[in-house]
Image: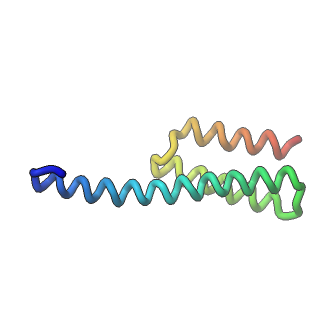
């Protein structure tokens, strides 16, 4: 543990940010899995699931959890599967 007061504060804020980022990343992975499952099964509400997944991906990129090009790659992958 650090001795400097400001560094002690940074340790705490970094822990909070890590927890927040982990929650967003986990939600992102779950959403992508749901979209892939909906596309492979051909369920009726697949368009809504894909739209929700796009939203989750965009929000994660906006918050800086993932890079914007990573977000574009993930969205393109889902779009490619939805066309086939």
Pick the quarter of the image with the C terminus.
top right
As drawn, the residue found furthest toward the front would be 1
With 49 as the anchor, is 74 left or right in this view? Answer: left
**Quarter occupied by residue 37:** bottom right
With 2 as the anchor, is 30 left or right in this view? Answer: right
Instruction: Tell me which residue sits at (59%, 42%) in the image.
Output: 71
> How many numbered discs, if any?
0
Q: Nearer the viewer, residue 83 or 35?
A: 35
Instruction: Tell me which residue sits at (68%, 51%) in the image.
Output: 32
Image location (x, y in percent) of residue 40: 86, 50
**Colour mode?**
rainbow
Instruction: Tell me which residue sits at (20%, 58%) in the image.
Output: 9
Image location (x, y in percent) of residue 13: 28, 58
**Is 15 placed above or below 76 here?**
below
Instruction: Tell me which residue sits at (14%, 54%) in the image.
Output: 6
Image location (x, y in percent) of residue 21: 45, 54
**Quarter occupied by residue 70:** top right
As drawn, the residue found furthest toward the left would be 4
Image location (x, y in percent) of residue 30: 65, 56
């Amino acid at each position: 543990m650090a001795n400097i007061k400001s560094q002690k504060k940074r340790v705490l804020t970094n822990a909070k940010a890590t927890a927040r980022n982990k929650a967003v990343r986990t939600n992102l992975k779950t959403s992508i899995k749901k979209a892939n499952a909906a596309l492979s099964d051909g369920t009726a509400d697949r368009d809504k699931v894909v739209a929700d997944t796009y939203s989750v991906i965009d929000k994660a990129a906006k918050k800086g959890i993932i890079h914007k090009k990573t977000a574009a790659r993930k969205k393109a992958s889902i779009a490619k599967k939805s066309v086939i």
